Amino acid sequence: MPPIEETPVYEVFAQHDALAFATHVGSLRAPSAKMALELAREAFFRRDPAFDVWVVPATQIVHARDFPITLPTAPEEKSYRLPSGYDNGPQWKRFKASEQKIEDVAQEMAQPVRRIPQ
Amino acid sequence: MNHPTHEQIVALKRLLIPMADDEWMMGHRGSEWLALAPDLEEDLALSSTSQDEMGHAKVLYDLLHDLGEPSADYHVYFRPANRWHHARVTALPKSSWAEWVVRRYFYEMFDQVRRSALERIPYPPLVGALKKMDREEAYHADHARSLMDILAHGGAESYGYLREAITDDWAYLADLFEWIGPDESWASWDVGELAPSAMRTRFESQVHQDFAIWGIYWPEGVPLATRKARHHDSSPDLPALLDDMREVRNQAAKAHW
Amino acid sequence: MKAVEEFLARVDAGEKIEVRDWMPDEYRDLLIKQIHMHAISEIMGAYPEKEWVAKAPTIQRKMALNAKIQDEIGHGQMLLRLAEDLSQPYHRGREALMDDVLEGRVKFHNVFHLEAPTWADAGVIGFLVDGGAIITQAMLLNSSYAPYARMLKRIVAEESFHMQHGESVVLALASGTDLQRTMLQEAINRWWPAMMFFFGPREMGPASQRMMMYRIRTMSNEELRQKFITRYAPRIRSLGISIPDEALRQDPRTGQWAYTDPDWDWFSHMVHHNTGPMSQARLGLRRQAQVDLRWFREASLRSAAYHASRGA
């Protein structure tokens, strides 16, 4: 039998909730982008819902591994970009104040605000 | 209306048994297409649809159980053939792929009309059940349309299969719009949309519109049902279907499986 | 040659390979062979089980079995995508890889050539065949080919539902009437020898040995079979069901199981030439989807082109 044309491949990405970044979940064959979305629903989300789903024609994706020079690598010594190596803690202590961490700030912001009654 | 009257219960059953049976049969027949769809991706979509339909049937049988009917498993595995009330088109034996696409499409369009009418009945458990089905059913209808669109715009061969399948199924559509029992069963709710003629009109207008987009010849209105609609005392397909479906269960009806 | 040595050194060091990385032709070909066969086995596995969806004895079982078969088609789809990506240099896509099944160019697992004549077979397939597949797949989680290992992580997660489903059917039969227990015993009698063949010959063939070298797989056939017997033999016996192998016993010192060899030649001929009792019937079903309905796949493309040309 003569070969028939291949159905195009779409890569599928999903954002699991409103605050999540989209991640790759797989790929499928579909005749059109709309059909790819219809089919992705039952191919990849039978048990988990998604906040959003993207489908991208596989041929449209450019890979850094094909241009190795662009591939991000572990940086050489760039300690100046990192939060470690500071000695603010002991210094605050000298000023009789306490060291703070960013997690504490985030946590405090998550607490309900206590308003002083008028 | 949390506590329906006796008359209301009778009317509810007359509306819900046919719907549950339709959903069950579409799910059961749909399962026969497992691993036989034209591609793997479509197989997954198809299988979900069959599972959803059987799931909806189960929800409706459970609602009926709360209204004093026997259990869901009784309805499926032990009920006599003459007490099934699905429309015959839902239980037709497996035919061609094009016929299945067309059958699905007609059923989904009908089901949308029926659900939107039933939602007006102020019985909270039913309202809740229908709401849960809505998301899945909206997807079914959307996907059914996509498959029809492929048949319609897929070239001469597929268009030919489409025409053939429409001709085959058309004669069976009448039953969909009929309810069992006296015609007034729907009337006790004062929901005019449940009248067979009203449902048929809404269905026809939707399908007519789709057919125009797809360039399909409109074969006049859906035929009117006979008095035997949704009664299967001498239905040719049902006994074989029930025998097959119950083959294992009948080996030890009371056992735990 | 130096490139191959460097590649092997990377793999030996536990590095993972991606589809776009350079790889020796042999590595690519072994991966295609393995993943293609795995994918096709998932798909062909749907046929013996699907017969029982129509006849499943409760609503719950019917829906669960439907969902389980759907998962298997889904695994087939995901794995086939991997095989397709690897086959790009050969210009072979989904159509070619699917046609291979019908033309006997790719094998599928021996168990799916056999009959499944009762509901108990549907249960035992879930119990033993899925159990065996889970053991193999858990081993492949360490595969050097990253896309395969990633995919298997998802597949294994879904298999845990299959395992519970298969066990539940078997446990219900084992706790049931005499008829149900007899049905279960007969199904175990049918499937046990097939499961001994499932993991392959005691001495691995050259392709399997090369797969070990490339760390595509990390355990021998015999190691997998021993793990299977260790897990399943005591469980079957605890149900009061006997295993149809008088030679089956565990050496208390080494923990190794002695077992009767399956009819290697018969099974091997069956998987290579599709001569099992159900091989042709199941291939016939696959042909319905792949060949008889190819007009619909062509129609899908034509319809998409029609809409694209209208700017929709």
Image (cartoon, rainbow, N blue to C red):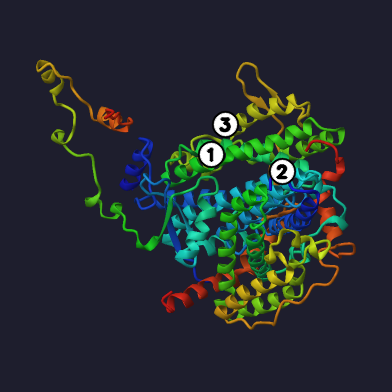
Quadrant occupied by the C terminus of chain C? bottom left
Q: Are marks 2 and 3 on the same chain?
A: yes
- Mark 1, other Cα within 10 Å: few <14 / some 14–19 / many ≥20: few
Mark 3 to mark 1 CA distance (whole Å): 23 Å
Residue at horizontal 49%, vertical 52%? C32
Q: Which chain hosts label 1?
A: C
Q: Which of C260/A103 is in front?
A: A103
Q: Quadrant of residue C184?
A: top right
Does residue B111 lie above or below C17 as drawn? Answer: below
Q: Are marks 3 and 1 on the same chain?
A: yes
Mark 2 to mark 3 CA distance (whole Å): 34 Å
> Which of label 3 and label 1 is nearer to you?
1
Earlier sequence position, callout 3 versus callout 1: 1
Residue at horizontal 79%, vertical 49%? B76
The reply to whether residue B155 is visible in this rendering is: no
* Residue hosting label 1: C157
Does residue C109 lie above or below C292 as drawn? Answer: above
* Residue hosting label 2: C61
Q: Which of C34/C6 is in front?
A: C34
Residue at horizontal 15%, vertical 26%? A85
Q: Position of residue B48 (x, y in %)?
A: 61, 54
